[in-house]
Every structure is written in C-alpha cells, then in structure tokens.
Image (cartoon, rainbow, N blue to C red):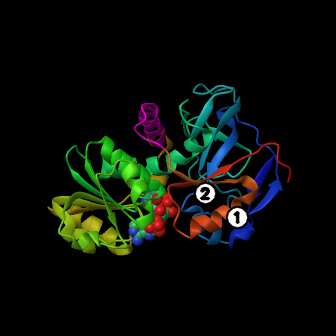
Amino acid sequence: MKAIVYTKFGSPDVLEMKEVAKPTPKDNEVLIRIVATTVAAEDPGIRARPGLNGFLKPKKPILGFYLAGEVEAVGKDVKRFKKSDKVYGNTGLGLLGTYAEYICMPEEAALAMKPANITYEEAAALPNGALTALPFLRDKGKIKSGQKVLINGASGAVGTIAVQFAKYFGADVTGVCSTTNLEMVKSLGADKVIDYTQEDFTKNGQTYDIIFDTVGKSSFSGCKGSLTENGIYLTTVPSPATMIQMLWTSMTGGKKVGIAATGLRPSNEKTKELIFLNGLIETGKIKAVIDRSYPLEQIAEAHKYVEAGHKKGNVVITIDHNAKI
Ligand SMILES: NC(=O)c1ccc[n+]([C@@H]2O[C@H](COP(=O)([O-])OP(=O)(O)OC[C@H]3O[C@@H](n4cnc5c(N)ncnc54)[C@H](OP(=O)(O)O)[C@@H]3O)[C@@H](O)[C@H]2O)c1
C-alpha cells in the first residue's frame, strides 16, 4: 500500500510517499481502507521535533491521528464492526498511522459509524475539534445553559467546534478571531464576535463564565479580570505557570483554571463522545469546517500550510487508491 513515511525529524520534506506492506488484522482488529485523513495542528511539531513520537528517530514512521474510511476486513473476534461499514475516528498517539491507504485498529479503538449525512472528508475533520472541545467545555468547564462563554481562536479546528458545542449547550457565545474569519465564526452560531486585531477581549470590561483559549494565545493572569466570580479559564496549550495555577485554584475558591491532554484519554471515552457527536451531526447541530483539501501525495504542502498557523477549521487529506507513486 502507499503511505507517507518519515524516518527522521525535520522539515516537511522528510515526508516521503513509499510502498509499504499492507497490514493484516489480528483477531480483535478491523482493517480500514482510509478515504480521508487530516493534518492536525500538532502534526507538524511531531514531524519536526523529537518528543511525542520518539527521541533519536520517529518511533512510528507513519503520522496521522484522524481517519474516515470503510472496513475492508475484520478479525474473528470483532463484534462491533463488519466488512463495508463506513467508519471514522482517532488512532491516538500509540498508533498514529493514518497517512496511508490502510490501517488496522483494535475494535475498542476510538471508532464510530460515519453518519450518512456527511462526507468522508467531513468525517475525518470532525473528531479533532470534537474530541477536544467536548471534554474541555462539558467535563472541565461544566458548561450550562445561559452562561456567557468566550472562545478564543474560534476559527481553528478546536475553536470552530467549540463555538458550535457551546451554542448546543445553550450558552451565549463570543468568538474571538481575526478580521477574515468574523463571518465564518458568526455563521457557526456565535452570538458575538471580537476581531482580535482591533480589540483586546481582556480589556473591554466584559466578563465570562468560561473563557476557552483553544489556541494558547492568552494567559490566566491576563484573563482573570474577564472571568465572573466563579468563572473558569480553559486552555489547550498550558504553560508551566498555567499548570501551577490549575493546581492552586483547584484548592481555593473563586476563579479556576482547567487544562487537559484530551488526546491521551482512554479510547472508550472518545468512542462515547463520537457516538454523542453522531447525534448532533445527524440533526445538523454540528458541522465540519474544511479550509483546504490536498491529495496524499501533496502532504508536505499541507504541512507547510498548517504550520503557518492560520488554517480555518481543518486541512483534509484525500486518498486516491488508484494513484501511482
Ligand atoms: N490539550 C489538548 O488536549 C489539545 C488537544 C488538541 C489540540 N491542542 C492544541 O490546541 C491548539 C489549537 O489547535 P487547533 O487545531 O484548533 O489549531 P489551528 O486550527 O491550527 O488554529 C489556527 C487558528 O487560530 C487562529 N489564530 C491564530 N492566532 C490567533 C490569536 N492570537 N487569537 C485568536 N485566534 C488566532 C488562526 O487564524 P488567524 O491567524 O487568521 O487569526 C487559525 O484560524 C494547538 O496548539 C494544538 O496542538 C491541544
């Protein structure tokens, strides 16, 4: 099968399309023919630097967290899926491997049936934001109807879904983004939008029950004055100071800090969230925002675009199984 392989950390040029062995499912695994994957915000960092995927060289040679595709075969013990099921999900850091034509995943992995009303591209795009925004807003933020919620970075993969979840939970939502993304964020349901190039939300006198910084461009100290008395500051990109503030505020009353490593949670939690998400997709309450699509062979270009940090929603990779290397 064709796959994008990297054997050393570095620039996007380390990503090479190669012919590698097609995997065979073990008894508890499903073999998925991948139709679409994504380049998530974290992928370029994992490609470029030692750390999350090994130290001397990449531990897993094929990157990619998110996928949508069709089950081609199942191991003899698999009960949850059958051949021809259309599925989508998230492999997690322990497996990666979606920049490829096929992948084997345990049936207990974070996988769900793809809703019929979305494309494979949309299905590949949705879990990144959803499996982050949902645990942050619902579980850490304990979001409630009628609360005032501010989403910073409302135009990114996490932000575009966070705005929609916050609306779904009945909040009054303010989205913070740049000028070019104001209309898009409004179209996702934000009640108000703030253009961060024109206005600093920490200095406009407004207060919020939840400030969710999806892009790590603010700090708890900077946002404290914009939180209500028992408000919570959530961030996907915690600094060492934020981690200490989280511990400290968990022991004291008043304003709190919440952080999470949502990608490292157990698969069964993520699967439950995908099933919950399916209900919202099927009723049109949550939709995917796709900025660009690239074919698998142009993945280095996709990495360059994503690492520039301005993508709107998601960058999707489509896999043409008839393409030649
Ligand atoms: N903790 C966790 O569990 C977890 C889970 C998932 C992701 N993450 C991390 O969360 C971060 C965000 O992920 P993502 O996928 O949503 O990122 P993304 O899609 O790459 O975010 C890019 C968006 O942020 C906007 N942006 C840039 N600077 C901004 C600023 N100063 N204020 C407001 N918006 C700004 C950009 O638009 P403009 O440049 O046009 O403004 C762009 O639309 C990443 O660092 C990722 O690694 C953490």
The answer to whether mark 1 and mark 2 are in CB contact below 8 A is no
In the image: residue 295, left or right of residue 193: right
Residue lying farthest to the right in this orientation: 324
Label 2 within 8 A of ligand 1 by Cβ: no
Q: Quadrant of residue 13?
A: bottom right
Which residue shows up at 65% across the image and 25% down it? 82
Residue 278: say if magenta.
yes
Q: Earlier in the sequence, mark 1 or mark 2?
A: 2
Q: Along the line of sight, which residue is nearer the eye, 160 or 216?
A: 160
Residue 283: say if magenta.
yes
User: Is residue 83 visible in the rendered structure shown here?
Assistant: yes
Q: Which residues are magenta?
A: 270-287
As drawn, 115 above or below 39: above
Residue 266: give x, y in percent of width and height.
Answer: 47, 45
Residue 93: give x, y in percent of width and height.
Answer: 57, 54
In the image: residue 58, left or right of residue 269: right
In the image: residue 153, left or right of residue 233: right
The quarter of the image holding the C terminus is bottom right
Q: Which element type, helix, strand or loop, lies under badge 1?
A: helix
Instruction: Give the number of the disc on residue 222.
Output: none
Instruction: Give the number of the disc on residue 300.
Output: 1
Three-letter code for the amino acid on which mark 2 is drawn: Val
CA gap, disc 1 and disc 2: 10 Å
Residue 300: give x, y in percent of width and height.
Answer: 70, 64
Q: Which element type, helix, strand or loop, lies under badge 2?
A: loop
Q: Along the line of sight, which residue is nearer the eye, 108 or 69?
A: 69
Which residue shows up at 76% across the image and 52% down it? 3
For the image, the number of numbered tags is: 2
User: Is residue 46 visible in the rendered structure shown here?
Assistant: no
Residue 299: give x, y in percent of width and height.
Answer: 70, 59
Instruction: Give the number of the disc on residue 39.
Output: 2
